Image (cartoon, helix red, strand yellow):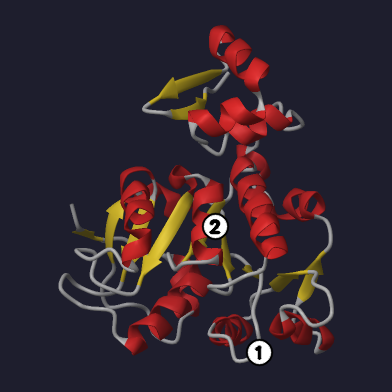
Amino acid sequence: MIEEINFHIDSLEAMKMYPEKLYFIGDTSLLKRKQISIIGSRKPNQYARLKTQELAQKLAASGVCVVSGGAIGIDAIAHRAAGYANTIVVAATGLDKRYPQINAKLIEEVEREGLVLSQFQEGVPSKKYNFVLRNELVVALGDILVVSYADLNSGSMRSVEYALKMGKEIYVLAHRIGESEATNRLLSEGKAKAIYDIDVFVEEFGDKKHRQSKSDDVFLLFCATNPSYDAALAKFPSRLFEAELSGEIEVKNGRVTLLKG
């Protein structure tokens, strides 16, 4: 059910104009969690895909809510890797539409377990300027902005402009010369910092209050991201059965949930 947010979100004061109205489907308690925005190209290379997945997964396991725009490419990778219960999708349409259609299933899952936000009322289609407004909201929600991959003239650079105006720190993945040229340029201009070690980055920006007591256990970190049963079985076959029997995890509706101990 589409509802209207009736409380103030302090982080949105950084926007040029605080949204007149915000509509949502899902769990608004995520707005009270620490948030990091992850954005990037719709056509990232394989390295950026893998590192974005690792980054979002580990941030979610450390208590961070991952924010992105629901687009194909980096956005979708970040949402999925964080786990649907640990992510916010910011839409560029009314919430009666799931755009882009190719990500309709993803957005539906986030509606059920996470949070989908929009500045636009029901019936509003995907107009060009809506994406500009959507990008500003994505940036404003995050404590910092991570740009995983972006070519020159990429739309992600508009989001970077917002982050600079808001005084937010910008981080980028370290890329080889000739790849992700826009983020490499940000580094050369001193407008961004590079992520050289994802674990070090997560240690610095993860929410220490929400970390699991066994945060050094890779299996439990993985389960904290609410993965599918099949993914957990493929990655940790023997440990999965042990953890289920011991009550460390629960398997429900084809997904693994880490139980609080």
User: Mark 1 = which residue?
Assistant: 152
Q: Are marks 1 and 2 in contact (CB under 8 Å)?
A: no
Foreground residue, 44 or 204? 44
Task: Give the x, y percent position of residue 153.
Answer: 60, 92
> On the rendered image, what quadrant is the C terminus found in?
top right
> In the picture, residue 156 is in which quadrant?
bottom right
Is residue 9 found left or right of 260 in the rendered image? left
Crowding at mark 2 (Cα within 10 Å: few <14, some 14-19, many 20+): many
Q: Position of residue 101 (x, y in %)?
A: 31, 65
What is the quadrant of residue 16 in the picture?
Answer: bottom left
Q: Mark 1: which amino acid?
A: Leu
Q: Amino acid at mark 2?
A: Ile
What residue is pinned by disc 2? 77
Q: Is residue 212 visible?
A: no
Asked whether, in this view, residue 174 is left or right of residue 70, the answer is: right
Residue 175 versus residue 217 in the image, above or below = below
Can I make out residue 99 in this image? yes
Q: Is residue 23 above or below residue 82?
A: below
- Residue 143 lies left or right of residue 177; in this view the side is left
Q: Residue at coordinates 23% horizontally, 70% vertically from top-left?
A: 94
Helix, strand or loop for disc 2:
helix
- Is 117 situated above or below 255? below
- At horizontal 58% and vertical 13% (from top left) the residue drawn is 241
Nearer to me, 229 or 251: 229
Q: Position of residue 171 (x, y in %)?
A: 72, 70
For marks 1 and 2 on the same chain, the one whose residue lies earlier in the sequence: 2
- SS class, disc 1: loop
